Image: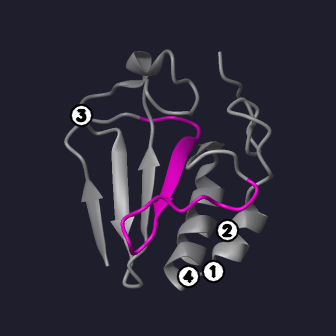
Amino acid sequence: MSITIHKNLSNVSIQFDNGYIMSIKIGSNAYCTPYSVIDSHYSGDSISAQNAEIAIINPDSEFHRIAGQDDDVVGWVSPEKIVEIAYRVACGDMDAVAKILKPSKGKEQDNDTRSIRV
């Protein structure tokens, strides 16, 4: 297992022993809040947001489309759900990952946060 923090400080990826990778992204090019005013959240060399965009890459280095989602990435995912999803991805239980996330209804779908895309 390995953790990679990318130089742009807006993306972290975790590669699990089973070959799956989970990407967690925040920032102006991500489906998270507040994606349009992220510069106001810079503090030294860090960046923060209330939620994040995630993606799962399978062992064949292709995006894994989570059942019930309409895109390869899922936005506005809370930190608590990110931890739960990471555990399920590490176990290879993609059915459980799908159950954690609400089915999407488009990019404006909110995954249990009060934020909306502006």
Q: Residue 23, image x and y in percent?
A: 42, 55
Q: Are marks 1 and 4 in contact (CB under 8 Å)?
A: yes
Q: Which residues are magenta?
A: 48-68
Q: Residues within 10 Å of mark 2 (few under 14, many from 20)?
A: some
Residue drawn at the location 60% of the way across and 76% of the way down: 88
Q: Quadrant of the C terminus?
A: top right
- Residue at 36%, 65% in the rendered image: 61
Residue 93 marker: 1
Q: Earlier in the sequence, mark 4 or mark 3?
A: 3
Q: Of label 2 and label 3, which has the lower sequence position? A: 3
Q: Amino acid at mark 1?
A: Asp
Dot 3, crowdedness within 10 Å: few (<14), some or many (≥20)? few
> Which residue position is annotated with label 3?
45
Give the position of the N terminus as an image quadrant. bottom left
Q: CB of mark 1 within 8 Å of CB of mark 2?
A: yes
For residue 42: magenta?
A: no
Residue at far left of view: 7
Q: CA distance from mark 4 to mark 3?
A: 33 Å
Q: Position of residue 22 (x, y in %)?
A: 45, 62
Give me the residue at 73% from left, 39% from top: 113
Hey, what amino acid is under mark 4?
A: Gly
Give the Cα separation between the discs numbered 1 and 4.
4 Å
Q: Secondary structure at mark 4?
A: loop
The residue where tag 4 is placed is 92
Q: Nearer the viewer, residue 9 or 65?
A: 65
Q: Are marks 4 and 2 in contact (CB under 8 Å)?
A: no
Q: Which badge, 4 or 2, comes first in the chain's sequence? A: 4
Rounded to the nearest angstrom, the CA distance separating label 1 from label 2 is 7 Å
What residue do we see at 64% from left, 48% from top? 78
Q: Residues within 10 Å of mark 4 (few under 14, many from 20)?
A: some
